[in-house]
Image: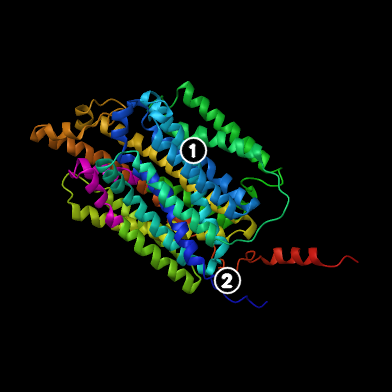
Amino acid sequence: MTQAPPTVPKPNVRLVLFGLMIAMMLAMLDNMIVSTALPRIVGEFGGLDHFTWVVTAYVLGTTVSTPIWGKLGDLYGRKSVFLTSVVVFLIGSALCGMAGSALLGGPNDGMVELIAFRAVQGLGAGGLMVGVMAIIGDLVPPRERGRYQGMIAGIMAIAMVAGPLVGGFITDNLSWRWAFYVNLPLGGVALVLLIATLHLPRRRTEHRIDWLGAALLSIGITAVVLITTWGGSSYDWISAQILGLAVLAVLSLVAFALVERRVPEPILPLGLFANRNFALISVIGFLLGFAMFGAMNFLPLYQQTVQGASATNSGLLLLPLMFGMLVVSLVVGRAITRTGRYRAFPIIGGAVMAAGMALLSRLDVHTGKLESSLYMIVLGVGMGFLMQTTMLIAQNSVEQRDLGAASGAATFFRSIGGSFGISLFGAIFANRLADSPAGAAFGGGGGEAGSAMDLERLQQLPGQARELVLGGLADAISHVFVWAVVFTVALPVLAWFIREIPLRTANEPPAQTPEEQAETALAKAPTP
């Protein structure tokens, strides 16, 4: 069979890509930007015991909505669904900026309002992240896709570092509310640009939304996120609340699996997991999110406490990680486009990422900034090999009609892995810290050891006591990276079993096995 000639991207792809980059930047930036504004928010509203929900509500909204947005794009067309998610995100951003203001009743309920509005913002962000990847999949065939997804990976790397920097600058010079208001003009530009330039084929088929499946998935994932957020901190792991949530999660997810096997338009087609590459990439994405998001949260803590950097400077100290990820993502994307081969990259990336985590496990009170920067470059290089290659393999493993569901599932597993990682590594850090001089100095005791950490108090400690505390902090942080190695070493092992399926040069169904070809020929044969 003659292979179709390579598809040349339409002239508007670059303009569309610019709009998509802005949208992805907004979704990733808001995941990071609020961290530096939280002390000011707590100072204005109070509610120190609930402030972590400002972050959790956003993560929860994003995680729950990701597969739903992906499937809605498959059903009703990517453009209208994606633009709707942009509007939801912007509405959530505006409401977050107004939380606790006179327009909404004053500061008494400001923290509760902000948490609720962050959930709305997260619902929109889930559509932004999956929509960007799926639209690129619609516009560009897999053979050409690596180059464009490499650019998106670069934007994600920039956002991960720029978030704390931008948040610190806005909070210091304007108001924490502008950390949310800044989304409005940028999102408006992306909205207008995409309305004018994004042209995708319209879908005119009859559909029925799997509302029951969407509800069961939302309940199950919400229960899982609550377990990872509350377990070991707000409630004991064997408390009635955590065990009840575990039962709810299991029952709802089992019911979800049963429903998805019977409905004609499932939110998450379980048949996708029969594809070996898709199943492997889903597990790899989970472990990638687990190790990456879970462990990386502790780098700014190490820099601000042990190395004595300011909040803004700790963002600058993450630039080596961003540089390694950005450069490698772009190089790998172009290499895939040129050669059409990709299997080696997740294997290399997993091995390099494990090496980076192993190097970071060597961090101690005497590690210099140059040495830690070199370690972060290694980690960034490993992430650069993996971030978008996993998405490309997931998309190339399915038919075009399931592209949104596949993109949503890949993003979903990475997000839920990050949620698990943040929780588990946080518990590991807190327990290690509680047994150290640092835990005793900061009111240690179980999972609360690090909750009252005060950098000014740390600086006021006498010399020898300060060294003991810094040593305890460095030991607890390095212990997190030791555990991260345990999870990252599985990445190259799993990636080894990925099959090299030729990248399609047009947006057509993936290559069939001989058995599938025989079945297709039999189905098409004329009836006697």
Seen in the image, is 43 located left or right of residue 10? Answer: left
Decide: is 517 above or below 413.
Answer: below
Seen in the image, is 218 located left or right of residue 52? Answer: right
Identify which amino acid the numbered label 2 is placed on: Thr
Q: Give the Cα distance between marks 2 and 1.
A: 38 Å
Q: Residue at x 43, y 41 (%)?
A: 93
Residue 312 falls inside the magenta stretch: yes
Dot 1: element: helix
Which of disc 1 and disc 2 is earlier in sequence? 1
Q: Residue furthest top?
A: 240
Circle 1 Cα neighbour tier, 10 Å, few/some/many (<14 / 14–19 / ≥20): many
Q: What range of the chain is rendered magenta?
A: 293-321
Q: Nearer the viewer, mark 2 or mark 1?
A: 1
On residue 505, the disc is 2
Query: Residue 439: image x %, image y %?
Result: 23, 30
Q: Residue at x 57, y 75 (%)?
A: 6
Decide: is 492 above or below 41.
Answer: below
Dot 2: element: loop
Mark 2 touching mark 1, by CB under 8 A? no
Q: Which residue is mark 1?
A: 120
Q: Residue at x 57, y 73 (%)?
A: 7
Task: Using the rendered view, name the quadrant where residue 50 is placed.
Answer: top left
The residue lying toward the viewer, choosing from 313 and 89, is 89
Seen in the image, is 6 located left or right of residue 109? Answer: right
Query: Residue 481: image x %, image y %?
Result: 31, 45
Q: Residue at x 45, y 65 (%)?
A: 344
Identify which amino acid the numbered label 1 is placed on: Val
